[in-house]
Image (cartoon, rainbow, N blue to C red):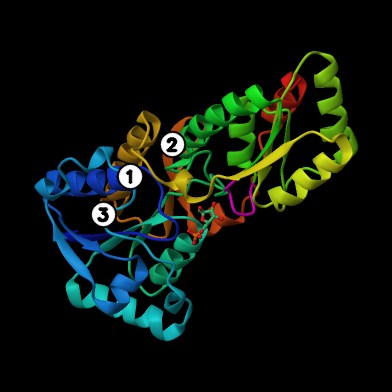
Amino acid sequence: IRRIGVLTSGGDAPGMNALIRAVVRTASAHDISVLGIRRGYSGLINGDIIEMAARSVDGIIRKGGTMLYTARCKEMLTDEGLQKAADTCRYLGIDGLICCGGDGTFRGAQALSRKGVPCIGVPGTIDNDIVCTDYTIGFDTACNTAIECIDKLRDTMQSHERCSVVEVMGRRAGHLALHVGCAVGATAICLPERELNFDVDIIEKMRVGRIKGRNHHIIIVAEGYGAAQDVADRIHEATGIDTRVTILGHIQRGGSPSARDRVMATRMGYEAVMALEAGKTNRVIVFDDNRVTDLDIEEGLARQKDLEQDLFVAQQTVAI
Ligand code: F6P
């Protein structure tokens, strides 16, 4: 192969820049030229494309966001949009495409692969909700950002003897909420994947906690579970405890990537280029059993990913 393209699509995630850097530098080391497709698949449809060289990615490993911008491109779901994207690849002599994002991004890559454009997906989302991989780029940094914010909240909750109800991102999945809740020592975590008995799993725990001398509480609510305000209202109604709501929101998507995200992005970016060079297509790079490897996209999206049950049990046990 002589020329490849790289794009980031869907919600941005810290480490996407490190991924772009790894792709560009790996390609450069193998005498492959790289085109940066801007704004996800819409850059392919609209020809929003830049040339990239080893030096054009200097210094970006430590930067949050994505220098190629990102978008959720509805046009890719239409036959016309898809055809335009495939035509652009053919016209520009793109022999392979690396697409970093979530499962929507992989469906786009799969559709383009069927049109004859070799595509490799790389998991990049703070949600860590992609079924075929144990890790997605951005998850660790988002966890750390949320933890830093909630540690600050704890200071003021402790001083006022209040209950803090914190809404954490994750779309329909609770991975981010579970990890963050565990790491901040939350009294309870509301997750979309686990049924919750409000009286037993929250109110009773708060009551026991109080008896054991805890004067304040942190309750984590995954956005996929429901509104943090409703949870806070119910807690206040049942306990009379002064309760405050914080929605962390998009702050969780920003910031300089952690060591884990930089390293993982580098490994995955390298593997993605090597996969294209080996003539592979319609594959997704995954972290599985402590190894970075690749998997058929179809097979990858068909797998089931549940929460880490061991972590869930451990968190529940040590909560109060
Ligand atoms: O998928 C990443 C994510 O941040 C989710 O956690 C969240 O539900 C969604 O994106 C928010 O999307 P947007 O940035 O379009 O509001």
Image coords of residue 300 (percent x, y)? 54, 52
- Looking at the rendering, which quadrant does residue 101 occupy? bottom left
> Which amino acid lies under the numbered mark 3 shown in the image of this protein?
Met
Is there CB contact under 8 Å for labels 2 and 3?
A: no
Magenta residue span: 168-173
- Of the numbered discs in the image, which one, if any, rests on residue 254? none
Image coords of residue 70 (percent x, y)? 36, 61
Residue linked to disc 3: 67
Left/right placement of residue 274 relative to residue 244 reads: left
> Which amino acid lies under the numbered mark 2 shown in the image of this protein?
Thr
Residue at 33% in and 63% down: 118
Left/right placement of residue 97 relative to residue 174 reads: left
Is residue 233 found inside the magenta-colored segment of the image?
Answer: no
Residue linked to disc 1: 64
Give whichever of discs 2 and 1 has the lower sequence position.
1
Is there CB contact under 8 Å for labels 2 and 1?
A: yes
**Front in this rendered view, residue 115 or 121:** 121
Specify the quadrant that holds the C terminus. Answer: top right
Residue at 32% in and 48% down: 272
Q: Main secondary structure of the magenta part?
A: loop
> Which amino acid lies under the numbered mark 1 shown in the image of this protein?
Gly
Q: Report the Cα–Cα distance between label 2 and label 3.
A: 18 Å
Q: Is residue 84 above or below residue 201?
A: below
